[in-house]
Amino acid sequence: MTTDRDKHKEFWLELLETGNGEKECQRSWNVYCNWRYGSQFDRLIPLEQIKELWRRLGISSNSGEEQKRLNSVVASTVGDHPEWPKDSSRPVESFMDFRGQKTFQNNISFAGRVLIGADFRGVVFEGWADFRGTVFLGLTRFDGARFEGREPMQSASHGVVSFERSTFHNTAYFNRVQFPHVTRFDKATFNSAVYCREAKFSSSSRVGGAVFRRAQFRTLSDFSETDFEVPVGMENVKFHGEAKFTETRFRAESRFNNTKFQNTTSFRGATFGKPPKFFNTDIREDVNFNGIDWSGAEQSYSHWLHREGDPDSIVEDAEDAIRAWDRLALIMGSQEKLAERHVFHRLKMRAQRQRDGTIPLSAANWLYDVLSGCGWRFGRALAWWICHIAVGAVILADGWPAVPNSLAVSLANSLDFLRLGSRVVICMMRNTLSKGPPVILTGCSL
């Protein structure tokens, strides 16, 4: 039994290929949307944006001949035109509903088109998927979709799936989406919230990446618990609203250079496979780096774990890590976040140790870390100081009766800068005649 949703889905797929060549197909789609639903767009976006949209797409209201052609070719082939939802009190949802398609076995292109309430939940894309320059109106849903294509588009630089220069005017959902090894969101604009929770950017080859260069997130952007197996490029991105990377896994390189975080930002509990790069990055005070285990990032340039690797590459990786940690320490220091600053300072000191190898300077670096946590662990430093006094007392003591005196001597020596020895001098000597206990002489000097 054919449902209205299936019927409408067939209509949109038919319209998608109406025309000779990609450019004509794009125009046919957009002319149809302007003709049938243009009067309803003021419920989705402001009037100024509507005018700019049609101007950019080169569509005018004087398209009578094209409208007649579309009416005869498309509607007569598929059936009645999809009707605009009666309930327009909220953003349009699932108007262009492709869930019944289940799988796009071939390459598919929605590039340069206006999509209204696009719903691709659970859809599998087995070829490349092109959404470059697509305008999404109403709610956009890709929850649970899988992009399984392996071969990139005609121009490999466009990736396997691309949302380059696309615009999302209402909330977009990419929760639990499986992306391919090359995914692009370059210059994409999210005018409303975007949810990309528990998504996975997988890697099926050595060459891959998730690219968000120059993207703009106007409100909330939620990447919590997302798994990036591929390098992440978020250079020159603007996060105007809250940015969430809570428990996000960056297994490869992550770059946030020249990016602006203008609101609350959270990396709490995130995982980094390599030191993240935040060069020339603007981060506001409300940033959270708590609960992060940086051991994975440190292992990426560990001298001991990569003994079989190229020594020069190990040194180069360690030097890159030093620069990355140093930059994060400077950012935290400028915001007077002393605890966070010292975390990155310690990571920098350890990276220097990996770079220098087994030399006296590295040994001193290691000792500084072990004894005091690079000057931050007060409890550890105090414990070592007490142990130092106790060891000194054991060396000086000559039997249990002498322990108090030897502790005093060891304490005075450890606090020599207070000149305690000028006022209290403990003479450790035995009376050869009486063989009595040591004698404490106060107010004398040796």
Image (cartoon, grey):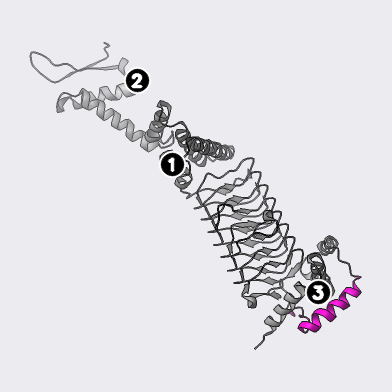
Instruction: Name the residue carrying label 1.
Output: 306
Amino acid under disc 1: His
Amino acid under disc 2: Asp
Residue 194 lies, with reference to residue 264, above or below; the image says below
Instruction: Name the residue carrying label 2.
Output: 416
Q: Earlier in the sequence, mark 1 or mark 2?
A: 1
Residue 369, percent from left and from top? 41, 34
Q: Name the disc covering residue 37, or none.
A: 3
Instruction: Rate crowding at label 3 as few (under 14), some (14 to 19) or many (20 or more) other CA atoms within 10 Å.
Output: some
Q: Going by the image, does 436 lie left or right of 260? A: left
Residue 442 lies, with reference to residue 149, above or below; the image says above
Q: Going by the image, does 119 lie left or right of 313? A: right
Q: Earlier in the sequence, mark 3 or mark 2?
A: 3
Instruction: Rate crowding at label 2 as few (under 14), some (14 to 19) or many (20 or more) other CA atoms within 10 Å.
Output: few
What's the distance in space between the residues labelled 1 and 2, CA to CA? 45 Å
User: Camera-side residue: 46 or 358?
Assistant: 358
Q: Which residues are magenta?
A: 61-86
Label 1: which secondary element: loop
> Are the residues at dot 3 and dot 2 in contact (C-beta closer than 8 Å)?
no
